[in-house]
Image (cartoon, rainbow, N blue to C red):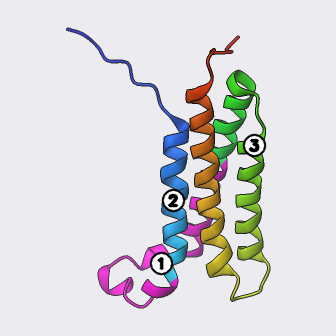
């Protein structure tokens, strides 16, 4: 019997988490009235939003910093990640109401882009630089 070895790909998890976060933030203003009827009112909870942001933040930092240190040594994905979280933070905490539904999803998709670029850099790196 052959056992399969599965390697957790943090970038793929990060892409999924940040995309779901962006979709959640973009769709929430439109769905806020129907979510309680579907039994999903908890999705409009601020704690759910903060939890999704924190999960995306930890996945991003862990995945991109690890890839930077161990393999491709390029800062571009990290800078894009920072820009994404800056959009989210400014949109969420600025107090300018009309900016939140624009900047928060934009930040989520920017974080997705950071993971996607990181994944491409890892795949194109000819040598595994792990020590």
Which region shows up in magenta? 29-57
Dot 1: what SS? helix
Give the mark, 3 or 2, whose residue is nearer the N terminus.
Answer: 2
Q: CA distance from mark 1 to mark 3?
A: 29 Å
Give the label, 1 or 3, closer to the camera. Answer: 3
Q: Does residue 95 belong to the magenta stretch?
A: no
Q: Residue furthest left?
A: 1
Q: Which residue is mark 2?
A: 19
**Screen quadrant of the N terminus:** top left
Relative image position of residue 83 (x, y in whole percent): 76, 58
Relative image position of residue 64 (x, y in whole percent): 68, 38
Query: Which quadrant of the structure image shows residue 63?
Result: top right
Q: Which residue is mark 3?
A: 76
- Residue 8, compared with residue 55, is above or below; it is above
- Label 3 CA crowd tier, 10 Å (few <14, some 14–19, many 20+): some
Dot 3: what SS? helix
Give the mark, 1 or 2, whose residue is nearer the N terminus.
Answer: 2
> Would you say the residues marked 1 and 3 are in contact, meaning their CB atoms lie under 8 Å apart?
no
Dot 2: what SS? helix
User: Residue at horizontal 53%, vertical 76%?
Assistant: 26
> Would you say the residues marked 1 and 2 are in contact, meaning their CB atoms lie under 8 Å apart?
no
- Residue 72, compared with residue 108, is above or below; it is above
> Would you say the residues marked 3 and 2 are in contact, meaning their CB atoms lie under 8 Å apart?
no
């Amino acid at each position: 019997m052959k056992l399969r070895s599965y390697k957790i790909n943090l970038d793929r998890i990060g892409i999924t988490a940040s995309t779901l976060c962006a979709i959640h933030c973009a769709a929430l203003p439109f769905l806020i009235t129907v979510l309680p009827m579907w039994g999903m009112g908890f999705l409009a909870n601020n704690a759910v939003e903060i939890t999704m942001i924190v999960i995306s933040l930890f996945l991003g930092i862990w995945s991109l910093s690890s890839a930077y240190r161990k393999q491709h040594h390029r800062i571009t994905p990290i800078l894009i990640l920072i820009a994404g979280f800056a959009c989210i933070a400014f949109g969420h905490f600025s107090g300018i109401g009309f900016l939140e539904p624009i900047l928060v999803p934009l930040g989520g998709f920017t974080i997705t882009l950071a993971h996607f670029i990181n994944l491409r850099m890892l795949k194109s790196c000819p040598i595994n630089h792990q020590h």
